Image (tube, helix red, strand yellow):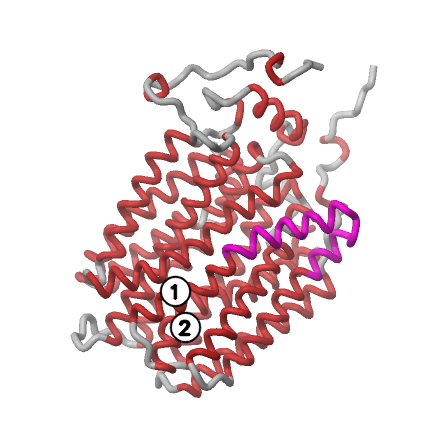
């Protein structure tokens, strides 16, 4: 071995691009892999922020004295759920796309296109609701690939022992996006007009894409200015796992997926999680405004509070889970069950309190506590794919996320119908239902989940090269 990092041989680098001659592709204080993680996080902040725009605009339409659009309940549900129709379709294909093309390119193009479509939304809303639904479906189609693509990025960039850390850092952008998106959409809507958040996020997203093109590369070896030390560290820690052939549609053991209880455990957990996540993203503002008569700006800030805690708790939960596993305090299976059932069980319990709360303060406190606890569950079911079948993680992620998205489709339709009369009693039903969903999910996960590598998760013997020490 070489004595010090300076003795490492200079790696072969790709030729610099035109822009690199003037300005080097790097953030001054971050290593290259953390630069990718932070940029991915910002990408998710933008993509989830865009999802808050519609909720705030709708609140403005329904509560303001000027009547903008005359939409029926069915039309409202269609607009709410249209995004998820598209999102559902591209989950599993997204996994294959990200293994076929460079994942960083797939991720970047997805968010840039979605931002461009966001600029078209106000125009579409003004013309015909059907155009609005069409643009939202397209947005969903494009954004469906972001999660699987993110897994694809970590295949080359994340050393195994930093996997939880880098992945939770990137994914916490999806909560931070709601934290910033709710108050920001509320302030822009109240201050300028309901179109403002759409234009703001559209331009920010396209600006982000320019930075992403400049700073993000498919794998460390393609980075023109990565240090030799970091390059060798990442490549040596990943070892041969990169060279394995990627699963194709034909080599993926679909039948084994469909007969494996641990896979169903992840899917059920994802469904329950999505049901309550979208309940809050889409309806928290209108719950606080119809049940307790709060203003638009206030609902934005109060609605962001639970997600702010989530942003802090998710990465901490990831580190805690890694710590408990590394030191052999609990088996991986027990870590996943404890974090998942503890987190969701507590969220369900606090939802019952929300259902019976009499004031905005107590409702908000209970909501905030509930959502905060659910942050720990992300270290349960959301990384579980990597335990049971690392090779098929992005496909399983696509499958479980796809089924979770069905919750996002049904949820607005069911809730728009329960709360037709905008009474306080109807919201009680909504939250008791949410709690029930969680309790069912927790029971199922506790019985069937596993943290061990499944027997079907390794490629069959003849595909493995025999090991020849000579």
The relative height of residue 423 versus residue 137 in the rendered view (above or below) is below
Which disc is residue 368 wearing?
none
User: Label 1 crowding class (10 Å Cα cut-off): few <14, some 14-19, many 20+?
Assistant: many
- Range covered by the magenta-colored residues: 311-338
Which disc is residue 413 wearing?
2
Tell whether position 21 is magenta. Answer: no
Residue located at (45% from left, 42% from top): 40
Q: Which residue is mark 1?
A: 81
Q: Left or right? Give the position of 407 relative to 387.
A: left
Q: Is residue 1 among the parts visible in the rendering?
A: yes
Give residue 240's position: percent from left, percent from top: 67, 27
User: Label 2 crowding class (10 Å Cα cut-off): few <14, some 14-19, many 20+?
Assistant: some
Give residue 178's position: percent from left, percent from top: 41, 58
- Quadrant in the rendering for residue 283: bottom left
Q: Left or right? Give the position of 421 relative to 224.
A: left
The relative height of residue 131 versus residue 327 in the rendered view (above or below) is below
Q: Is residue 261 among the parts visible in the rendering?
A: no
Mark 1 or mark 2: which comes first in sequence? 1
Residue furthest right in the image: 470
Give residue 75's position: percent from left, percent from top: 30, 71
Residue located at (34% from left, 40% from top): 208
Is most of the magenta stretch helix, strand or loop?
helix
Disc 1 from disc 2: Cα separation: 8 Å
Give the quarter of the figure containing the C terminus. Answer: top right
Give residue 293's position: percent from left, percent from top: 33, 81
């Amino acid at each position: 071995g070489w004595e010090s990092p300076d003795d490492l041989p200079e790696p072969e680098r790709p030729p610099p691009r035109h822009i690199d001659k003037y300005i080097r592709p790097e953030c001054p204080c971050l290593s290259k892999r953390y630069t990718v993680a932070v940029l991915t996080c910002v990408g998710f902040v933008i993509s989830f922020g865009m999802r808050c725009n519609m909720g705030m605009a709708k609140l403005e339409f329904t509560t303001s004295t000027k009547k903008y659009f005359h939409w029926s309940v069915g039309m409202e549900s269609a607009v709410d759920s249209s995004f998820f129709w598209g999102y559902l379709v591209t989950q599993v294909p997204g996994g294959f796309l990200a293994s076929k093309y460079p994942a960083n390119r797939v991720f970047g193009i997805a968010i840039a296109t979605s931002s461009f479509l966001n600029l078209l939304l106000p125009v579409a809303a003004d013309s015909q609701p059907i155009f609005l639904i069409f643009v939202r479906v397209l947005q969903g189609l494009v954004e469906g690939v972001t999660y699987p693509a993110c897994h694809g990025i970590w295949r080359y960039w994340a050393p195994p022992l930093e996997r939880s850390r880098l992945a939770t850092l990137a994914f916490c952008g999806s909560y931070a996006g709601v934290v910033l998106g709710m108050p920001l959409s509320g302030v822009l809507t109240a201050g300028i007009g309901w179109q403002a958040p759409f234009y703001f996020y559209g331009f920010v997203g396209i600006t982000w894409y320019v930075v992403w093109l400049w700073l993000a590369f498919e794998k460390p070896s393609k980075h023109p200015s990565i240090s030799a030390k970091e390059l060798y560290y990442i490549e040596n820690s990943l070892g041969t796992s990169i060279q394995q052939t990627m699963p194709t549609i034909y080599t993926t053991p679909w039948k084994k997926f469909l007969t494996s209880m641990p896979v169903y455990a992840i899917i059920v957990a994802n469904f329950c999680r999505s049901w309550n996540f979208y309940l809050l993203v889409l309806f928290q503002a209108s719950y606080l405004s119809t049940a307790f008569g709060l203003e638009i700006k206030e609902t934005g800030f109060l609605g962001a509070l639970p997600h702010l805690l989530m942003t802090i708790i998710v990465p901490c939960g990831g580190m805690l889970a890694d710590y408990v596993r590394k030191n052999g305090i609990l088996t991986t299976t027990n870590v996943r069950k404890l974090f998942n059932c503890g987190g969701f069980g507590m969220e369900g319990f606090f939802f019952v309190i929300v259902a019976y709360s009499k004031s905005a303060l107590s409702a908000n406190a209970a909501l905030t506590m509930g959502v905060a606890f659910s942050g720990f569950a992300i270290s349960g079911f959301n990384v579980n794919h990597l335990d049971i079948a690392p090779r098929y993680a992005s496909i399983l992620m696509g499958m479980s996320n796809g089924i979770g998205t069905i919750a996002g489709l049904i949820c607005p339709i069911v809730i728009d119908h329960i709360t037709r009369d905008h009474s306080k009693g109807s919201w009680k039903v909504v939250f008791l239902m949410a709690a029930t969903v969680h309790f069912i999910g927790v029971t199922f996960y506790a019985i069937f989940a596993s943290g061990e590598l499944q027997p079907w998760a390794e490629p069959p013997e003849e595909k493995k090269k025999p090991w020849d020490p000579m």
